[in-house]
Amino acid sequence: MTALQTRLLLIAAALCAGLAGFWLAQQLDRDGPRLASGTWLPRPKLVADFTLTDSSGRAFTRRELGGAPTLVFFGFTHCPDVCPTTLMKLAQVRRRVAVARLRVLFVSIDPQRDTPPLLGMYVHAFDPAFLAVTGEPRAIAALAANFGVAVNRVPLPGGDYTMDHSAVVFLTDAAAHIDAIFTPPFEVAALAADLRRAAPHLSAAATT
């Protein structure tokens, strides 16, 4: 084999490898980003219709949930540790990651105690841009079930109670689809990196 033929074979092999790599990248891109701290859903799930009330007393529906990427977390203001820790980390993530119009929505699972004004004061202590909603118990229960969040009221001595719930953060897109799920332990750097990976896919996911 001449030197020219060898060179041509090497060029052809490199071209084939490049095309194969491009094809593989396209396939991986079609499947969504690879997340380190969460799971990208193969098929985005449309959030069911709902009507709740935001911290200003205005109606908050699926239409308001849409329009921008949103990190959704279910919790309650009397939560001793998991909720404040998670909200603190989400505030750090929001400051660290440059995802256009990224929002954080806190959904109260304790409407008996979490009034709209209290919710507003609570979430704004972590980030003034945070959103919070409450509402009728049935509406909250239906939305929690739609997201797959387990909620349980636990009686305490003396007549008080606390709330057990799934400590999961959901990523929704601009069309109110659930695209990704993040589970504890939440690490700010890993979550921020995952959101940067997910950002280019959010608009595409909204149309599927």
Image (spheres, rainbow, N blue to C red):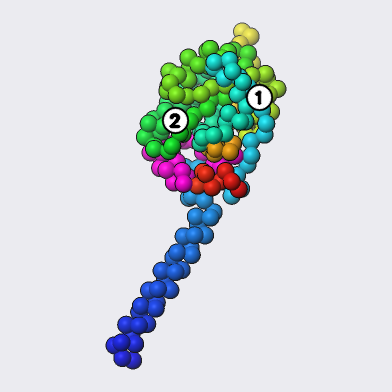
Residue 117 horizontal/vertical position (percent): 53, 12
Measured in 3D between alpha carbons, the distance from the residue under mark 2 to the one under mark 1, in whole angstroms, is 24 Å
Q: Quadrant of residue 21?
A: bottom left
Q: Quadrant of residue 112?
A: top right
Q: Residues within 10 Å of mark 2 (few under 14, many from 20)?
A: many
Residue hosting label 1: 51
Q: Up-down: is 146 above or below 108?
A: below
**Nearest the eye: 179 or 76:** 179
Q: In the image, 94: left or right of 44?
A: left
Q: Going 43% across and 74% down the picture, which residue do you hit?
A: 16
Residue 189 in view of the camera = yes
Residue 70 horizontal/vertical position (percent): 51, 33
Tag in front: 2 or 1:
1
Q: Quadrant of the N terminus?
A: bottom left
Does the magenta segment cover residue 198?
Answer: yes
Q: Which residues are magenta?
A: 177-200
Residue hosting label 2: 90
Does the magenta segment cover residue 54?
Answer: no
Q: Residues within 10 Å of mark 1 (few under 14, many from 20)?
A: some
